[in-house]
Amino acid sequence: MTHQNTIPPLAQNEFHGLIGVAFTEINPPEGMYARTWGSSNHDVADGLHRPLRATCLAFAAQDNAEPLYFMTLDLMVWMSNEDEKGMREPIETALGISPGRLILQLSHSHGAPFTDPALIDAPGGALIAGYRSEIVDACIRIATEAKASMTPSILSWGTGKCGLAYNRDLVLPETGETVCGLNPLTEADDTLVVGRVSDMSGTIQATLVHYAAHPTSLGGGNRLTSPDYIGAMRELVERDTDGAVCVFLHGADGELTPRRSFESDAEAADQNGRELGYAALSVLAGLFRPGERMVFDKRQESGATLGLWKFETQEPDQSIESKVGSVKLKVGELPSVEACRAECENAPAGFEKERAQRRLALREKVGDVAEFDLPIYVWKLGKTILVGAPVEFYSDVQIFLRAAFPDHTVLVLDVCNGFLNYLPRQEDFVKNSYPVRISLFAAGSMERARDKAAEIVASMM
């Protein structure tokens, strides 16, 4: 009797195309406004913990078509439309590309400074305009360098786990109040996805680390400019990959925080970064050589009857596509722009002023409207799917999309091409949690955005 071999191969998702990478440091000038926490007692940083970076990856098909540019900045958030568009649009213009061909993502590092031009009157705020110009020039430069350095390469992906992330909706037993703090009672998404860019000789050109945990190791007591845990993670991975550029991809972490959070000592960020870095190196160590997979070979008699496997050539996927869609979301029951402006003007200094300023900046982004069209950016690089939006998704979105497209490597990206705050889950609106209190959009918005993203991805299959 003949048995058909149905043993599946062991394979990693791979994209074969032209890939280039470049990076530069974007450290702010000494004396620039650096307050990002309402609990801070300082407005200007005392120094630099680890360098801030701008990094660019350029992707194109083998026919040398116009590339897609994925760019990351070690910055906190864009506070206003002017803040974000004043950076992204000059880069798109300089590169001669249409919207959607550049995804500009912030690491959301809470030790990195704000760049809003509206902060000109804050202590050290006069230095922000010059810093913004330097960032834009740096981004154009590294995008040009990344395009010029594009070479036939293979992007390989592996998936592992890292226990750094914890749920951060902590319910205080004495009062029932939900505070923003490490909650060990609720399971957190611990999925870690790591990419490796290799040229055709097998030399590693870059690594990509996708993980979801707020870069909030350091809180208001920290007085150093910092990329948070990303800095130590990056240095560790680069050390063990012969200096290949390490790129952090900020995952869907709306409800997730690292184990050590909101601390004053920079060692908290470094310890968190080492944990993520070693986990990423473990995933890299498990990757096969580019363009290979393992298949069952034969049985072999020994003390036991063994099943032997072997490597064989695998042709990576060369398809590449990008789409920009949108979903109409209902704006929540918010104070008007004028009411937010009056609150900001009358708020006392300190955390109350900080909250009011942020509330006004966010309210002004959507205006006094009932509905808002949220853009969603989707790229397909072979069987790699990137989904980005100008919000902070909860991890449920990436869990849902991974399950919907199990044969693909799915990367959900927060704070892309803008910042419109959190999209909490519908069930979270019964809580009075921080993300719910400051969300711009009504209950059910996360689910609508998630389903729209799935619809766009499905249209690209």
Image (spheres, grey):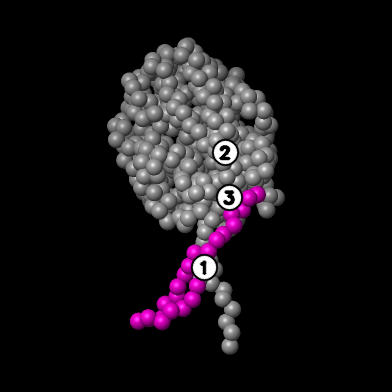
Q: Position of residue 409 (x, y in %)?
A: 55, 52
Closer to the camera in the image, 260 or 38: 260
Q: Can residue 68 be seen from the camera position used here? A: yes
Q: Residues within 10 Å of mark 1 (few under 14, many from 20)?
A: some
Q: Residue at x 48, y 18 (%)?
A: 131
Q: Residue at x 33, y 37 (%)?
A: 270
Task: Say which mark, if any, is on residue 150.
Answer: 2
Closer to the camera in the image, 38 or 30: 30
Assess whether residue 205 is covered by the magenta stretch. no
- What segment is highlighted magenta in the picture? 297-319
Q: Disc 1 marks which residue?
A: 295
Q: Residue at x 56, y 59 (%)?
A: 314
Foreground tag (3 vs 2): 2
Distance (Cα) linking label 1 and label 3: 20 Å
Sequence order check, earlier mark of 1 and 3 = 3
Assess whether residue 298 is covered by the magenta stretch. yes
Task: Say which mark, if any, is on residue 15.
Answer: 3
In the structure shown, which secondary structural element does the residue marked by tag 2 occupy? loop
Q: Position of residue 180 (x, y in %)?
A: 41, 38
Q: Residues within 10 Å of mark 2 (few under 14, many from 20)?
A: many
User: Which image quarter: residue 417?
Assistant: top right
Q: Taking 65 as reference, is 361 above or below it?
A: above
* Image quadrant in which the N terminus is located: bottom right
Closer to the camera in the image, 34 or 62: 62
Amino acid found under the numbered disc labelled 3: Phe
Q: Are marks 1 and 2 in contact (CB under 8 Å)?
A: no
Q: Can residue 214 be seen from the camera position used here? A: no
In the structure shown, which secondary structural element does the residue marked by tag 3 occupy? strand
Amino acid found under the numbered disc labelled 1: Val
